[in-house]
Image (tube, rainbow, N blue to C red):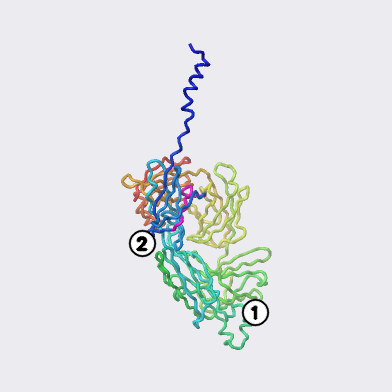
Amino acid sequence: MIPSALRWMALLVSLLPQLARPAPAPQTYRISGVVVDAQSSQPLPSTVIFLLAGSTEPVEIMASELTDAEGRFAFDNVAPGKYTLNAQRRGYAPQAYLQHENYWTGIAVGPGLNSERIRFPLQPSASISGQVFDEGSESVRAANVLLFEQSLENGRRMTRMRETATTDDEGHFRFGHLLPGKYIVGVNAVPWYSLAAPQLEEDDHGERFSARTDGNLASEAALDVVYPMTFFPNARDLPSATVIRVRAGDVEKADIRLQPMPAIHLRVRVPTSDAANSTNIQIVEQLGEGLELPVRITQRSAGPGLMELTGLPPGHLVLHADATEGGNRRTQTQNLDLSGDSEIEASKGNADVKVSGIARMEDGSGLPEVAVVQLRRLPGGDASFARCQPGGEFSFENEMIATGSYEVSLPNPDSFIKSIKATGAKVFGLKVEIEAGKDVRLELTLARAMSSINGIALRDGKPIEGAMVLLVPQDVEDFGQLIRRDQSDSDGTFTLKMVPPGRYTIVAIEKGWELEWANPEVLRRYLSGGESVQVGPDGIPSIKLKVQ
């Protein structure tokens, strides 16, 4: 009989060949495909392809490749997981794979998944350029040129200012790297000879002189002119402007000619005797829904409690009069439709209000380290922000809030507003209606229980990539900010993050990226084909969703 110690030694010797074997290498996969022009389907060589870790918020570039003469690319030895593909090429706007707005399709890699033979369509970028002329067919330099884009934003078709440019010495401007879409071009400028323009110019030797006293200009009345905001080709407002429909690769021209108009003088009576020192007046031109443009004006005191504004264009303007008297600050907002010289009283406008409040966690715990309350004017207006103090108090103290409808929300990703109470305002779900002359006090109840919903988009039992997945609350009218979206990845999977508890309907739409789903009539057609879900603090089991 072999002693115990010898028996264990013999067993160890017998196992040595197995222990010496190296561990099997982890299985890796391949991501490969071809980049093509989205319009012509022709392969695109010399395109830089980036492979990034993650499919929703990639933060690390794993590798990069240059496509070959046939537009092909390949990444070998890729570990299982999800990845993002980005492409860049001269003449094309940078794009992620199947990108729509801020969503794209991630590439799923692993057993049984097809991460090869990817067809990456790349949209050629377009451009809009032009020249700005004055009434004498002379080029206008240093004009402010604005590019507006008509597109879907959170399910609503909106017109937004995309970018600005300044004309060069010959009046030229250019907007490049544009994706297909609908655009509008507008010009805001000041006649070089007008009373509103700077009074001093420089000659060829750098000497400064007055452009208005050289003896060659017309009477002063002829100098008291402005260029109204002008949209291509010669429209005075956005609804009348010509929409430039840009296709992939287009090179569009948009020359604009400006015509001067007599400047309007506006006298404003303010509720203070020392108007020049205690009243600040701002004028903005309303171009459209949520679009305002500051108007360059000259203002002076015209007597006790009287301000005179010059350099105003005719049209629909908004006056903001910010007055301080006796240590108290007061702001009045007034809508104006001006066609000639006028006199108004600032006190006839709507008084902006102070908005403050307190935020408390539903469970009595402390607020997040950084808690911020956001007020966004509806529809599609600008946002104001107020940071909560440690005790939950907040105040929009640096600005007065105009009357109107606002959505109240938290930009913080780790909490949400569960309910709102208000004094001085009407509450509709997560929206408030602010009325003139009533300061507003808000009470916000917050909660932290946020869930994620995972699922797969299917058609006839097969995964569908690139589908828009939409999670809709029951009361979408007043709780629209709870809507969540995602785009299905190459294996059909999706993840909806930061979902508060509640009842929702979830839908998947294959060609949903051009739908005005914020329109209840449009959305209703798809909700009946969706899945009703009750989301709790722990979310819901993974869901299989039929693509419509």
**Residues at marks 2 and 1, CA–CA distance in whole angstroms:** 53 Å
How would you rate the neighbour count of disc 2 (Cα within 10 Å): few for under 14, some for 14-19, many for 20 or more?
few
- The segment highlighted magenta reads 46-59
Disc ID at residue 40: 2
Residue most extreme to the left: 460
Q: Position of residue 420 (x, y in %)?
A: 52, 50
To which quarter of the image does residue 98 belong? bottom left
Q: Amino acid at mark 1?
A: Gly
**Observer-nearest residue: 201 or 372?**
201
Residue 189 can be seen in this image: yes
Q: Position of residue 352 (x, y in %)?
A: 57, 63
Q: Amino acid at mark 2?
A: Ser
| In the image, residue 286 lies in the stretch drawn in magenta | no
**Observer-nearest residue: 77 or 160?**
77
Q: Position of residue 50 (x, y in %)?
A: 47, 53
| SS for dot 2 | loop
Residue most extreme to the bottom: 215
**Observer-nearest residue: 209 or 69?**
69
- Left or right placement of residue 68 versus residue 214 in this view: left
- Left or right placement of residue 303 versus residue 341 in this view: right
The residue depicted at 65 percent of the width and 66 percent of the height is 324
How would you rate the neighbour count of disc 1 (Cα within 10 Å): few for under 14, some for 14-19, many for 20 or more?
few
Q: Earlier in the sequence, mark 2 or mark 1?
A: 2
Read off the residue under disc 1: 206
Q: Is residue 303 above or below residue 460?
A: below
**Observer-nearest residue: 545 or 176?**
176
- Left or right placement of residue 433 versus residue 211 in this view: left
The residue depicted at 43 percent of the width and 53 percent of the height is 104
Residue 478 can be seen in this image: no
Q: Position of residue 313 (x, y in %)?
A: 53, 76
| SS for dot 1 | loop
